[in-house]
Image (spheres, helix red, strand yellow):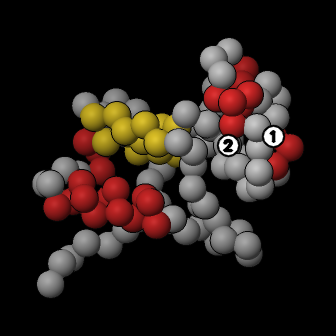
Amino acid sequence: MSTFCPELWPEDPTPDNLENCRECGLDQHGSRMVWGEGNPEAPIMVILDNPGAREDRQGDPVVCGTRQTLQQAASEAGLKKDDLYVTYILKRRPVRAYNKDEVRKPV
């Protein structure tokens, strides 16, 4: 039996000058910016599409299914939380349809 248990990794704070960024329009989705999570000094960086749900509708912290799978795979590979840093192409979680080409274009 596995002893794996997913956990909410600490967030890397968003740089002050980008906190209120409105360039891509995802700020209108009502989701907050998540710069990254895990250890920013880690030897391994994982780049995902966008942050997952970190809070349920009541505001309680949760680990989304993608993060659970990533954490379990890392655990099975013998990696620890401090070995990984997860960051995102999109820094906000889209909660409805959006113009993907516009949002993903380089700034």
Reading the image, the residue beneath label 2 is 92
Q: Position of residue 65 (x, y in %)?
A: 46, 67
Residue 14 lies left or right of residue 48; in this view the side is right
The residue nearer to you, when weighing 50 against 74, is 50
Crowd rating for badge 2 (residues with CA inside 10 Å; few <14, some 14–19, many 20+) = many
Q: Is residue 106 left or right of residue 78?
A: right
Q: Quadrant where the C terminus lies?
A: top right
Q: What is the crowding at mark 1: few (fewer than 14 residues within 10 Å), some, or many (at least 20)?
A: some
- At horizontal 66% and vertical 22% (from top left) the residue drawn is 105
Q: Which residue is mark 1?
A: 27
Is residue 98 at least partly visible in the picture?
A: yes
Q: Is residue 31 visible?
A: no
Checking the image for residue 97, the label placed there is none
Residue drawn at x 34%, y 56% as measured from the top left: 70
The residue positioned 37% from the left and 39% from the top of the image is 46
The structure residue drawn at horizontal position 59% and vertical position 60%, both measured from the top left corner, is: 54
Q: Quadrant of residue 106?
A: top right
- Check disc 1 and give the amino acid type: Asp
Provide residue 76's location: percent of width, then percent of height.
Answer: 16, 61
